[in-house]
Amino acid sequence: MSDSFAPLLARIQDRAATVGVIGLGYVGLPLARALAKAGFRVLGFDVDAAKVTKLNAGTSYIKQIPDATVAEMRANRFEATDAFDRLSEADAILICVPTPLTDAREPDLSYVTGSARAIADRLRAGQLVILESTTYPSTTRGDVLPILEKSGLKAGTDFFLAFSPEREDPGNPTHTVAHIPKVVGGLDSHSGDLACALYAAIVPQVVRVSSPEVAEACKILENTYRAVNIALVNELKVLYDRMGIDVWEVIDAAKTKPFGFQAFYPGPGLGGHCIPLDPFYLAWVAKRHGMNTRFIELAGEVNTAMPAFVVSKIADVLNDAGKPVRGSKVAILGMAYKKDVDDPRESPGFELMELLLNKGAAVTYNDPHIPVLPRMRHYPNLAMTSSALTPEYLAAQDCVLIATDHTAYDYQLIVTHARVVVDTRNATKKVTEGRGKIVRA
Ligand SMILES: NC(=O)c1ccc[n+]([C@@H]2O[C@H](COP(=O)([O-])OP(=O)(O)OC[C@H]3O[C@@H](n4cnc5c(N)ncnc54)[C@H](O)[C@@H]3O)[C@@H](O)[C@H]2O)c1
């Protein structure tokens, strides 16, 4: 029996525990907020000193988290820091750092292993470590555990280790930490008990599974399921387009079936930090087990072909007006990867912009949530600011492309003033006047 377990469980149950959250991004910050609200003292760790300064001053850098929320967190004993020595102050440490792909599209676990090393250097008996970052099954046991045990402390007796995936749905106010059940897999029963006790304080339901591997595989299943189903409707979009059938009308009709069908929608390509990347973590680990995950590869192929399909539609539309792409004015509406968020990560808008620029189009954009394009790793040269969405601006374009269906847009105004609108999101569904100018892509 571990001497560390009972006191830590009591500290968690009494909310006397200090919780450390490493990585204060789209996942870590809402989590820190929920923990602080539940009464825990929360220490947020981030390598980005500018973020730390902002948070401690009560200001936010994520649109969905207003300044008032950060101020409330500060009042609830939340503190941000880049002093990783303070990890020893935390009773529980949650790792919420990025898990991107390398240029060779292989898992880049360097942020996770770097965080594990930072913890291991200060690990003390009686700490609980939980990995939240999305990754392939076996990471917690195979990659994180050995680093932590280099401290000389033993998991399950001295310290505790679990995996619990985040299920953030940015931009959706009904899907916050407080609304979404959380899957938890402990390395051993004590680790599972402690992690479940911690999350029970902030989520409506804790779903305990038998191991970290099951929890890791569950998260990747959820994201792969989306990637594959989106690929299916994207492929059907191209087919139905050739056949003169509106795929959106088809999906709306199909979803009236009360069983056995879940609606997924086509788009200009995948975006965000999860769906375009995570399935490739699974594909990579599958190869280590001598297997190819063909569904994942095929879905990736179909989804990554979508921006080129959209650009071919724009070329057709311009051709119909007797214009080449070169020199034509194209406005992209929406550079965020999904509606109503300010997150540009992996957004197809960037690829659309680059493809159009490479063909010589005069491209500008508007996004009410992204006033200036950030420097993206794969698109370092797309420096641009958002154009004002005025009737004059719309009328001056040869083609207006709706890449993201932000709620803030007045779609009737857009259609009224544009010469032609290429709509990749069915955003103009309710527009009544000028429907002849709308082309789906
Ligand atoms: N964004 C989502 O909707 C979402 C949903 C579910 C799961 N996830 C997963 O959660 C993880 C985090 O994603 P995110 O969207 O919050 O990323 P993010 O980029 O928004 O935030 C990551 C934060 O970690 C910080 N950071 C980077 N390296 C660090 C280090 N070594 N130590 C401390 N801080 C460090 C960055 O400065 C940043 O603030 C990823 O594995 C992602 O796949 C994301």
Image (cartoon, grey):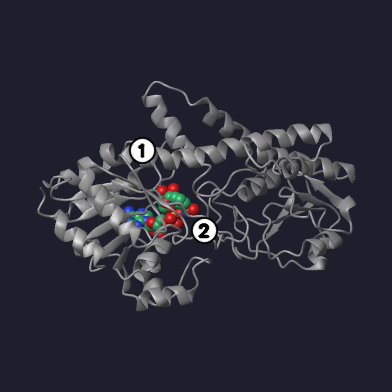
Structural distance between the alpha carbons of marks 2 and 1: 23 Å
**Looking at the image, can residue 388 be seen?**
yes
Up-down: is 221 above or below 403? Answer: above
Q: Residue at x 48, y 60 (%)?
A: 176
- Label 2 neighbour load within 10 Å: few <14, some 14-19, many 20+: few
* Residue matched to label 2: 175
Q: Residue at x 73, y 37 (%)?
A: 237
Viewport quadrant of the C terminus: top right
Q: Residue at x 23, y 48 (%)?
A: 191
Left or right: residue 42 compared with residue 311: left
Circles 2 and 1: CB atoms closer than 8 Å: no
Q: Residue at x 40, y 51 (%)?
A: 182
- Where does residue 256 sit, x and y in percent of width and height? 71, 44
Up-down: is 112 above or below 31? Answer: above
- In the image, 195 versus 83, the foreground residue is 195
Secondary structure beneath dot 2 equals loop
* Residue matched to label 1: 214
Secondary structure beneath dot 1 equals helix
- Label 1 neighbour load within 10 Å: few <14, some 14-19, many 20+: many
Please state the quadrant of the image where ligand 1 appears: bottom left
